[in-house]
Image: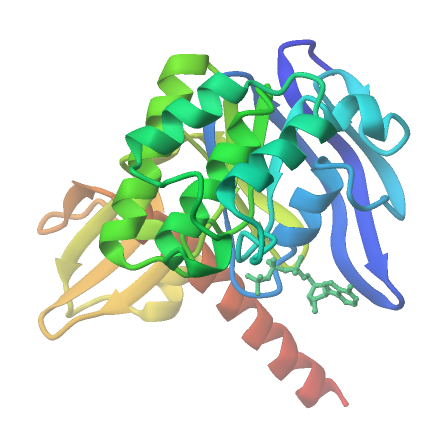
Amino acid sequence: MSTDMVVSTRGLTKQYGKLLALNGCDLDLPAGRVVALVGPNGAGKTTLLRLIAGLLHPTSGTVSVLGRDAATHTVAALSQVGFVAQEHPLYKRFKVRELLRLGREMNPGWDQAYAERRLAGLDIGLERRAGQLSGGQQAQVALVLALAKRPRLLVLDEPLASLDPLARREFLRSLMTAVADDAITVLFSSHVVSELERVCDYLVLIDEGRIRLADDLDTLLAGHRLLVGPRNGHSDDALRSADGVLTVVHGQRHINVVARTGAGPAAPGWQAHPLGLEDLVHAYLEQSHQARTHRAASEVSGR
Ligand SMILES: Nc1ncnc2c1ncn2[C@@H]1O[C@H](COP(=O)(O)OP(=O)(O)OP(=O)(O)O)[C@@H](O)[C@H]1O
């Protein structure tokens, strides 16, 4: 493992009974990045995040966080990791002031002045009860509680899920100020891929418990292209089976092909365009979906 990696997993596997939720994941996350973890429902995102936060033990393989084994040094590892679970649960009957006191009592590195400053900046009064705050304000309080631990790694499970577009923007803005001020590494899962391009600089794509992609966003975007060409004269199967081609979609007059840069059709009439993050993620998931459908069909016909 390289020492400047905040998270390193090797062969990380988690089974719930017979269900294989994570399957032999090797992952290295460099320090100081904002990492988006994306994947369809049930892909294994929460499981991976909980393993990294030391809240679950692997069935096999290893997970090292900030140079320590997260499974065996949980207390030491956890003090440097801020974790906000899905739906950012807070003790709803507690006042914000009481939540801060709890945080202070439970975390040796607690920074009360920082917490109060951030809450004041968000206009969230310390005497408000958590349960009476809006969903967006509760998400912000959960973020402040995690940041006031002064973690080196902040792990957020679906922080945007229950927020409306405005609250999402505000939440991401707060997150970005914290990242800029404190140089922490952030790892967060999300289904809202369209919003990630502005905030993250590293992407991990997980599907069926396996890591499909993990790289700098710029490298990934530069490494793929959308190719648009005329409909006639191309067999779908030939296009699809070409090396480096991820997806082939027929429009009314054109065919859209997502391919690795340098691969795919290059005949006259074809034009290459840059690919956005949403299209890139969609292309990989579509490719997995097609492979699954193909596998299922072969199993049925082989019976
Ligand atoms: N405690 C559990 N017991 C049994 N199976 C579980 C448990 N937690 C998760 N699973 C299963 O493990 C797989 C991965 O679940 P996980 O929650 O990690 O996925 P996810 O990518 O976070 O999904 P989502 O986007 O829907 O939140 C799923 O098939 C899920 O049903």
Give percent across and percent down for residue 137: 38, 49
Q: Name the quarter showing ligand 1.
A: bottom right
Residue 176 seen by the camera:
yes
Q: Residue at x 71, y 45 (%)?
A: 50
Drawn side of residue 111 relative to residue 202, left or right: right
Give percent across and percent down for residue 146: 56, 33
Residue 192 seen by the camera:
no
Here the colouring is rainbow
Farthest residue, direction front: 127
Q: Which residue is drawn at 47% across and 26% down?
A: 115
Give percent across and percent down for residue 107: 70, 25
Looking at the image, is 91 positioned above or below residue 40? Answer: above
Q: In which quarter of the image is the N terminus?
A: top right
Drawn side of residue 293 relative to residue 249, left or right: right
Q: Which residue is drawn at 80% across and 19% down?
A: 68
Drawn side of residue 118 relative to residue 228, left or right: right
- The residue nearer to you, when weighing 248 against 281, is 281
- The residue nearer to you, when weighing 31 against 160, is 160
- The residue nearer to you, when weighing 24 against 243, is 24
Q: Residue at x 22, y 44 (%)?
A: 266
Looking at the image, is 88 positioned above or below residue 42? Answer: above
Give percent across and percent down for residue 180: 36, 17
Quarter where residue 153 is shown = top right
Q: How many labels does the image show?
A: 0
Quarter where residue 63 is shown = top right
Looking at the image, is 172 positioned above or below residue 226? Answer: above
Drawn side of residue 58 relative to residue 43, left or right: right
Farthest residue, direction top: 3
